Amino acid sequence: MRTLTIKYPAASLFLLMIIVAIFQYQLPSKHHNHISQYINANYWEITGDIAEPPTYKAPKTRLIISVIRLKNKGNEHAVSGKIRLSVWKDVSHYRPGWRIRFVSKIYPFTNFNNPGGFNYKKYMTFHQQIFGNAYSKNNQIEILNKELSESTPQRLYQHVQKTVSQMFANGTSEQASGLLHAIVLGNRDYLPNDIKAAFVSTGVSHLLAISGLHMGMIAMTAFLLFRWLFRRSEKLCLYGWSDMCAVIPSFIMMMAYFMISGMSPSAQRAFIMISIFLCAQFFSKEQVAINTLCLAGSLILLWDLRTLTEISFQMSFCAVFFIIIGFQRLPDHWIQISTYKPVQYFWQMLVCSTLAIMATSPLALHYFYHTSFMGLITNVFSIPLIGFIVLPFALLSVFFVFIWKPLAIQMIAISGYACDTLIMLINKMNGYASIFEYYGYISNLELFAWYGMMSLCFIRLGSKIKYVLMSLMILIFVLDGAYWTYERYFHNDLRITVLDVGLGNSALVDLPGGECMMVDGGGLSSSFDIGQYVVAPYLWRNKIRSLKTLILTHPDQDHLQGLIFLARHFHVKTAWVNGDDKPTFLFNTWQTTLDEQNIKRIQISANDQIKVGNATFVFFNPPKYNTFEDTNNNSLVFQLQYQQNTVLFTGDIERDAESLLCKTYCHALQSDVLMCPHHGSRTSSSQEFIHCVRPKDVMVSASQYNRHHLPNPVILERYAKANCRVYYTGRDGAIHIVLSKKGIHIQTTLNN
């Protein structure tokens, strides 16, 4: 009787854990007396414990609170669950474990509800286990108890972190200190934003987040060093114990690094994975590397099944998997090209980087819409600098700072010099980064086909089976390309998508034949770039890589901000503007960007008419002469005409502009669809204006929980009395409008 053997038992276990994790992700969580049951209710007196160190970014501090009690008008509820508290002042001196009390509503996390957009609400509630936002009323917080933060281990840990942080700050340059804080202490707040951006552009951003790469480099460096030392002993070599003995101090070094770095979730996963490899080495087991990797992955998923959906886990696992099978399956003459060790080392680093980039770039495009192939070059010198100089000397300085401070200072100086050298090289390479950068999107189907092809290249299968499967993967790519080619360039209708950009405006106009235009780009009153993180991803998901024209109705931030990123990355030819200037940094950046990208400005005024293919743009505002003092009233107002269908775009005009338009163009304003003026503000949408336009459908662009409470209920009632159907991005998500010979078809992302 034949015995069934499983060659890769850990791989089978890992596959089982993946299936279980997928089911857990799909099943909704049920909470008994959980904080999520009290979202969007009344104001509560909230009592809870600070769960994590506060983060302060002027002028706001954010604290994660484990809520234990809610009280309102004598009603008291014992609850569980975490919320995020924002306080508009610096309370970063608060410590985890302090019990505090404050008054606030609990608001839900919200998404930008565009098709395929990032599910921020799911990320916060599922991954971070944080279920709501709170804003302390009048910034008043009452501290009830500090005793929980006074434990000896916590005090010791904080003392070590503070001492090491001061050593980095005093012993190295500002930029080197920022890099050391990131890769040793796991804190990237000290690293200047321009340095972070340079690391992203040059394909080495993975070095800034503590992961398996860092743990592996520490373990490998320590193992090689201690193995060399133990091999000086004839007795250890005779018994074959030199490698076993080298594992123990290597593990201790890695454990120390793990604890100093703050034990973040990514560091925990890396620690488990490298520990499995070290254990196999210690017990002198003949390793099947794939089995060891899969066993580590299974243990990580057993620890927390949510890890499967974390991007860092997916990218790390894919990179290591394809590096292992790549080196196992590639012909020897591809791996061993020289007997000269330096040449051989750099060649193997290049092969390793190539395999890692091939494995991770599709995931980077899927999640971040960006990848850089410059990592093929930059990883060759970045990884050795970090692994063999920066990290070892930094960790030794951490050890000696409490024993022999002068030696620690010398060691951190060496580490800091290596950091400065690395940053200098990265900055020099950054000047050429745009040549190697790629922006775009890979769908789930395309991911499946790509990883299927990569796996088939390396995994041994019967030639006929491999031929059939490879043909299937290629067919998927061909059919996918054909579908998107038709969707982009061969549709006969005109498509408008009113994007959900919060309290702002942004609409994509997709003309027959594939030419695209963007009307406004949205914008928030923060450093969050709505163009990069919301508008551009929607375009890339729909395989839109160029925009013929950007239309800026007026230069307010909530209309302008997102257009700047689009101007830099979407091969724009022209920009239609109303001619207003605004003395702001944002507007100056816009003007500079147009000049740098050689984008032609076309100033528009009333009575202009522009024909693009079979579509016509008829402009009613701003007046050519005697423009308004208020920039809102100078917004571009134009009617888009196609196949007897009309859509009126209005920017942020208010009553003065509406009154002038009604007197001058009342009959011409009549349109099937109206883009509601000024987000549904009470200062716009006058009765006279609605009477002239007579829209059947009205589009309001505003977030659901905005500070101005838009759209105003009075305005909504006014449109209802005029028998208009009102669509609202805060409630309905992105709104798709299709203009064709058959008329107008409207579909919403939510509540369709």
Image: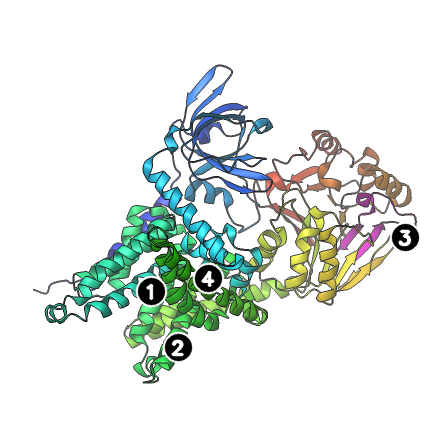
Q: Earlier in the sequence, mark 2 or mark 1?
A: 1
The residue lying toward the viewer, choosing from 421 and 528, is 421
Q: For residue 679, which quarter of the picture?
A: top right
Q: Earlier in the sequence, mark 4 or mark 3?
A: 4
Residue at image mark 1: 321
Q: Residue furthest top?
A: 74
Q: For residue 642, which quarter of the picture?
A: bottom right
Badge 1 element? helix
Residue shown at the point (63%, 54%) measured from the top left: 531
Dot 3 amino acid type: Lys
Dot 2 amino acid type: Phe
Highlighted range, magenta: 615-643
Dot 1 amino acid type: Phe
The residue lying toward the viewer, choosing from 164 and 616, is 164
Callouts 4 and 3 close, C-beta under 8 Å:
no
Residue 352 position in % (x across, y down): 38, 71
